[in-house]
Amino acid sequence: MTVTPVAAPSFLAAKLAAYQLEIIEAIAQTHEVAKFCSLNAAQIDRNGAFPEREFELIAKAGLLTAPLRRELGGLGLGIDANSIGELLTILQAIGRANLAVGRIYEGHVNALQLLQTFGTPAQIETYSADVCDRHKIFGVWNAEADDGVKIMPLGGGKYRLEGAKTFATGCGCVDRPFIGGMLPSGEWQLCIVPMDEVETIADPSWWQPAGMRATASYKVDFTGVIVDESALIGQPGQYYQQPWLSAGVVRFAAVQLGGAAALFDAARQFLQEIDRTKDPYQEERFGQMAIAIESGQLWLQGAATQIERYHPIFAGDPAIAHPQATALVAYANMVRTAIEQICLDTIQLTARSVGTRGLLPPHPLERIIRDLTLYLRQPAFDASIANIGRYALQTPVTDSLWNNERFTREF
């Protein structure tokens, strides 16, 4: 018998296999963290609370550093386009356990994507060390009211901040938030504020929500804070550059779908405990929900596919225009819109299924419905739908709207 020798795996194949194992391990660690998040969710469902222990576990599991590129000490989750599916899986798992934790963690991922996309090499190295060596939590605080932030140049590479931010998620525990502010020129500029090195005024009384209490999304006044030029990230206006702004909505959509799945599970458990699973009307409602949640999974898979085929780096190189940028934005808006409707339908169907008895605290259904209802209220909903329609109407009828062949990587 002739034995054909098997070629040894190449160095690149071995590296890829090792990388895939690390991603699998990160997902496994996420599920372990999620178990605690779920068990502790009721304990931190109060104004003034923050999921401190949850983020200690997230840091220990390597999930704070995971969104950094591998050469920076992370796994490239979300910044490497071929890992976006795994990132969405992780975000969904955390959202399923506790939407408040998922919201804060998604903001951390968002901030590290912005840093690695628009930051200089020196900024990326400095702030990556904050994550790897000091377990600093990042976030994005962009919402504001009439007293919004202004960034005033003082000369000598110094800038003074004036004004406040609203919905400052994770206030008191997010160490490195991205702050958007208006320059004297009228342009919008991002900067990172080291919260443990400056004095700000937080207003907890501003945050009195029905849901998402543990996100500690206070109002914060930055007036008087001085930052160096090195804290300014990217060029003026880059925060709103597409497709980065809109492509990122698939992240919070994944967290929200996790909340819908948690509702589905909690309602199933409730009906099983009271032996109401054989009612034909209940069967019909749960059939609708099962279809809806599986549809959400397929939307997330579709988003991962489109982002991966668009460019090797999440949303591409900001210095190079991509011919399919408008298509990617429209697809991301479809994902966001579809999953919002799935979540709204799940809220309504679970409420009908469990009745008043199942909606009373301390049953988790009551808390999850409050959290998900508030979290779904993301800005510019109508504009997102209009964007989809505009893209569809402007695409020639001879072309497929999202033909996979049109999304080719540009190296």
Image: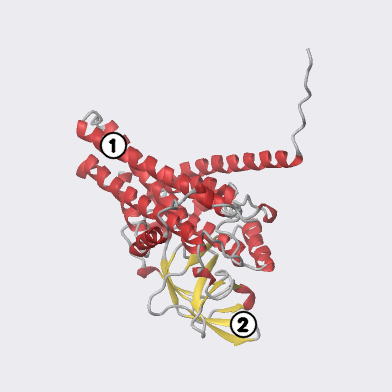
Residue displayed at 51% across by 41% down: 32
Q: Residues within 10 Å of mark 2 (few under 14, many from 20)?
A: some
In this picture, residue 411 sits left or right of residue 160: right
Residue displayed at 21% across by 31% down: 280
* Residue highlighted by disc 2: 158
Q: Total number of numbered labels? A: 2
Q: In which quarter of the image is the C terminus?
A: bottom right
Coordinates of residue 367 in the picture (x, y in percent):
32, 50
For the residues marked 2 and 1, what is the alpha-carbon distance in whole angstroms?
Answer: 58 Å
Residue displayed at 56% across by 74% down: 198
Q: Mark 2 touching mark 1, by CB under 8 A? A: no
Q: Quadrant of the N terminus?
A: top right
Q: Residues within 10 Å of mark 1 (few under 14, many from 20)?
A: many
Q: Is mark 1 on a helix, strand or loop?
A: helix
* Residue highlighted by disc 1: 286
In the image, residue 397 above or below residue 362? below
Residue displayed at 30% across by 44% down: 363
Q: Is mark 2 on a helix, strand or loop?
A: strand
Q: What residue type is labelled 2?
A: Lys
Quarter-of-image position of residue 25:
top right
Residue 362 seen: no
Coordinates of residue 174 in the picture (x, y in percent):
52, 63
Sequence-first tag of 2 and 1: 2
In this picture, residue 21 sits left or right of residue 150: right
Q: Return the residue found at the far top.
A: 1
Residue situated in front as seen by the camera: 216 or 118: 118
In the image, residue 147 above or below residue 179? below
In the image, residue 208 above or below residue 42? below
Coordinates of residue 268 in the picture (x, y in percent):
31, 36
